[in-house]
Image (spheres, rainbow, N blue to C red):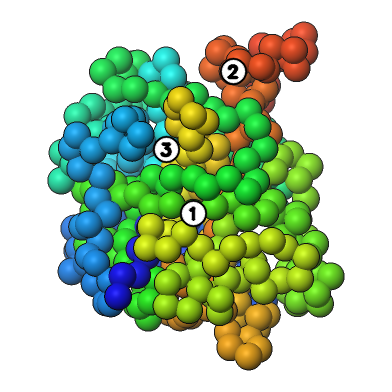
Amino acid sequence: MEVELRYANKLALVTAVAAAIGIMATAQAAVGPSTTIGIYTEADMLSPLTGNNTTPSNWRVTSGMTFNGTNFDGVARLRFDNDGSLTNGAYICSGTLLSGGLYVLTAAHCADDFNVMELAFGVYGGVAAETRSVAQAFVHPGWSGSLSRGNDIAIIQLNAPVTTIQGFNISTSNDVGQEFLIMGHGTTGVGNSTAAPNWGEYGWMHWGRNKADATVVQFLNAAQAQGIPSLGTWSNADGEEYVSDYDGVGNPTRHNTLGRITGLVSNTGLGADEALIAGGDSGGGDFVWNGSQWLVSGVHSWGWQFCGGRLTTPDSCDFSTGNSSSWGDVSGSTAVFSHAEWIATVTGVPEPGTYAMMLAGLGVVGALARRRKAV
């Protein structure tokens, strides 16, 4: 039986310990969403999980592969650290090269604490077609380390443009309800395994599909109305976030986490192509097809083993508390349309349709709030 892969997206953990191991903690009722910036060393190489599914290698983005005729070499692998060296292990995130080739869109938690970074494009089998370093990092001015305000977004200015690889335009519409293509350089595993995703497929980008089922405010308001505990306080003050669940194929009704919350509309998944981000995919893109091109619509932000202690009757919606990317888990992505004006102020290239919204004086990027990781 085919089982969807849960893709290693780089979720940055809010705690230093979780960040160091690069996986999400076991779910408890009081545990909230977490981003994990995983750490990678050669010692982390493990045999890929296969379980009851096709192997993760079947989900590789290989040389020459296209989706609707589009090549995704513009999805960057970010290797970075704050100790000045990438030779003794490094954090891993993902990002999206924007049209023009000079800027990469990623998550704020991937860009708020580093002093060395390599961005690699067109990575196949560990070999990159192009690499760049960082000229400047722009973190959303509202970012303070909290995942609750829709501002987990950043822009990396490269030291030189990438001219041999196609970049992407951003979506300027609210894409709730849309299916999207997931791309990331994170860990891999299978949704019906009790083991956590691992780095056995390091050196390859992977793809999958999912759907933006709801905004985070819709999701949490509905959960609160149902009396579900330990939700925290969320706001879309700085921007929207898209929420997706991982329905799986074994028992998609059970694992349709959002569909089990009264007031939310969520189907039982996309079958064998459905996936979810995992450690290392943070900052990568959710892409929507507008009929002529892929647009980057969401920036991978967080994952949440939401079910434990919340949705347990008659069965828990989570397949495994030991696998942070198993069936029933949920993920959140920063909605790019909410930040179109800010992106334009940084890159100097307004997206079509944003000119009328631009205000005088927005051409200057102000001081950026930065968060240092705890040590």
Q: Residue at x 23, y 38 (%)?
A: 65
Judged left or right of residue 305, residue 188 is left
The residue lying at 69 percent from left, 51 percent from top is 215
Please tell me whether mark 1 sits on a helix, a strand or a loop: strand
What is the spatial separation of the Cα atoms under label 2 and label 1, in whole angstroms? 25 Å
Question: Badge 3 local density, few (<14 within 10 Å), some, or many (20+)?
Answer: many
Q: Quadrant of residue 223?
A: bottom right
Amino acid type at mark 2: Glu
Task: Give the number of the mark in front: 3 or 2.
Answer: 2
Give me the C-alpha separation between circle 1 and circle 3: 18 Å
* Mark identifier at residue 95: 3
In the image, residue 150 lies at what x, y percent? 68, 45
> In the figure, residue 236 lies in which quadrant?
top right
Q: Amino acid at mark 1?
A: Asn
Residue named by callout 2:
351
Residue of label 1:
210
Q: Earlier in the sequence, mark 1 or mark 3?
A: 3
Q: Do callouts 3 and 2 mark residues in contact (Cβ within 8 Å)?
A: no
Query: Which of the two residues, 350 or 258, is positioned nearer the viewer here?
Result: 258
x, y percentage for residue 193? 35, 78
Q: In this view of the protein, which residue sits in the foreground, 146 or 60? A: 60
**Residue drawn at (78%, 50%), measured in percent from left and top?**
235
Point out the tag, 2 or 1, that comes first from the N-terminus: 1
Residue 187 visible in the shown view? yes
- Position of residue 340 measured from the top left corner of the image (x, y, whole percent): 64, 26
Residue type at mark 3 is Gly
> Which mark is nearer the camera, 1 or 3?
1
Instruction: Say few, some or many: other residues with alpha carbon within 10 Å of mark 1 (under 14 / 14 to 19 / 20 or more).
Output: many
